[in-house]
Structure formats: structure tokens, C-alpha cells
Image (tube, rainbow, N blue to C red):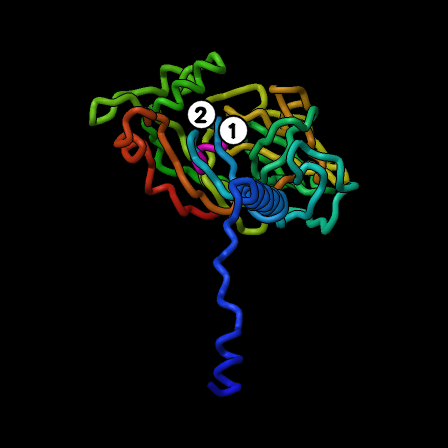
Amino acid sequence: MTEASIAADNSPSPSAPTPVSAKEEAVDTVRFLALLAIAVLVFRSFFLSPFNIPSESMQPRLLIGDYLLVNKMAYGYSKYSLPFSAPLIPGRIFPRTPERGDVVVFKAPPAAANDYIKRVIGLPGDSVQVRDGIVWLNGKPLQREAMPDFVIPVTPNMVEASRATGTLPCYAMEFEEVGPDGQRQCRYQQFRETLPNGKSYAILDITTIAEDNTPLVVVPEGHLFLMGDNRDRSADSRFPAMENQGIGLVPEENLVGHALVGMFSTDGSASWINPISWFTAARWDRIGDGF
């Protein structure tokens, strides 16, 4: 036997893999889940975050049951960008003022505890007044043109929201009718409003309310004048900042992000015990709508 063959014969045999204990597997799983949770938290805090629509204040653009993605990078960051408004960011960093017409998500004054969504009408230095339902910006009325009526079926989530607020699904019985299919529906007057920068959008003017006429307001530095597109069902900057009643002039620091795209929509008729209803309740035509 040669020296080479002796060396080969004396080489150690391959060892079997060391088994991983159940405890080590559990630790690895917990570590992975913790890292995943941190990654999701960071992504939702600083990049994109989901937001759902619980009210009719932004009809016709947004309906109850719409789910959006919100761009958290659009206007910079403050403590309100973080979960539970954790006070880890002093003031605002990378700040940017929205453009008129932007649809923004923000923490609503005075408590800054709840997320609201409204449209930017007035920027710092602007004068804003509503006269007979027409918005006047810097001394000039916003252009407003009549559009075909906005007709929307009365959906289960509309009924549920109206019960919670003690109102009717169509604001008042005079705005409710029976559609060709025999189902209840709401019919509202609709207009196209255009801002000086050319941005236009549909609004609803259902009836006459006290806030169709407001005092002249000059928006102070660092604040915004925000309104809902549904002018008769929106607690916005026309109302003083009182919890669940109005928001007043909103500090830019309260901004959370810019509405980016619709990612899902449901009419509220789905049932957990009926998987088919998960698909029939979806409003597929509203998915992917941008802003």
C-alpha cells in the first residue's frame, strides 16, 4: 500500500449534520417575526401607509369603505408620522407645504388623536371665505360649474355610518329615491370646482347650511385651510377646532401624508361566514384610482 493510499485511508469520515433543537428553531422564528414587524413599522411610518374612509365628507371622490395608500414622504415628518404619535421627532423634518387641491391625511385638531382626510384649499397667507356656498380665495370666487347629479346606491356601510351619527343615509329623505333596479339610492347636486393653479375636482352641494357663509379668514404661517368635497357633511376648517365638530386651521405639523391611490373598496355587505360575499361586496372599479 502506497503512502498516498494510507493517507486517504486515515482521513476523517464526514460527520452528520448537527440537529437543530426545537428551542433554537423557536428563537429563530421569534427573531424573524420581530425583524419583520420592525421592517413593517418603519415602512408604514416613513414610506406608505393604508388608510380607510369611514365617513361621507369627501364624496364624491371618496366613499365609505374605500381603502387608500398614503404617501408618508410627501410633506416631511413629525411625531404624527409615527405610531401613537410617539414624540421622537422634534417639530418637522424635511418639511414641504402641500399644493392647493392636494388631498391630505392629518391628525385632527384639537386633540390630534384621530386621522382625518380633507382637501387643501388655503395655504399660509391666503384669505379664504365662503359666500352663499361659493369659496372665495384671495378675493376671487373659485370657478364652479354644474355637473350631472351624483347618484350613489345606499350601501350597508352607509346605513351603519348614519346610525352611528344619528343621521339619514342620504342626508334627508328628499335626496333619497328608488333606482331602476328597485334599490335605494341618493341623488345629490354635483359641481366641478377649479383652483387658481388649474387643479379641479368634483364637489357636492346638497342643501343650504349656516357654513355656506363664513367670516373672512387669513391663513397664518404654518397652517392650512382644509375642506371636504362634500360641503354639507364635512366638519372642516369652516368650523372651530372642537372634538368631533370641526378642525379649525390645521397646523402643517399635523400632516401625516398625501393620498396616493385607492387600493381596495367595499360596500360593507361582506360576511365572514360567506366567502363569496368577500368578492361581491368589493367595488372593483374603484381600485387603482389615483389622486
Region in magenta: 58-62
Q: Is residue 16 highlighted in magenta?
A: no
Q: Which residue is mark 1?
A: 231
Dot 2 corresponds to which residue?
Answer: 206
Q: Quadrant of residue 190?
A: top left
The three-letter amino acid code for the residue at tag 2 is Ile
Foreground residue among 46 and 60? 46
Res. 207 in view: yes
Residue 14 on image: x %, y %: 49, 66
As rendered, which of 8 and 242 lies closer to the eye?
Answer: 8
Nearest to the observer: residue 85 or residue 251: 85
Q: Are marks 1 and 2 in contact (CB under 8 Å)?
A: yes
| Element at label 2 | loop
Q: Which residue lies at the image location 57% right of the left edge and 19% below the top edge?
A: 210
In the picture as drawn, the residue positioned furthest to the left comes out as 181
Callout 1 environment at 10 Å: few (<14), some (14 to 19), or many (20+)? many
Residue that lies at the very extreme toward the right in this rendered image = 90
Horizontal placement of 206 versus 28: left or right? left
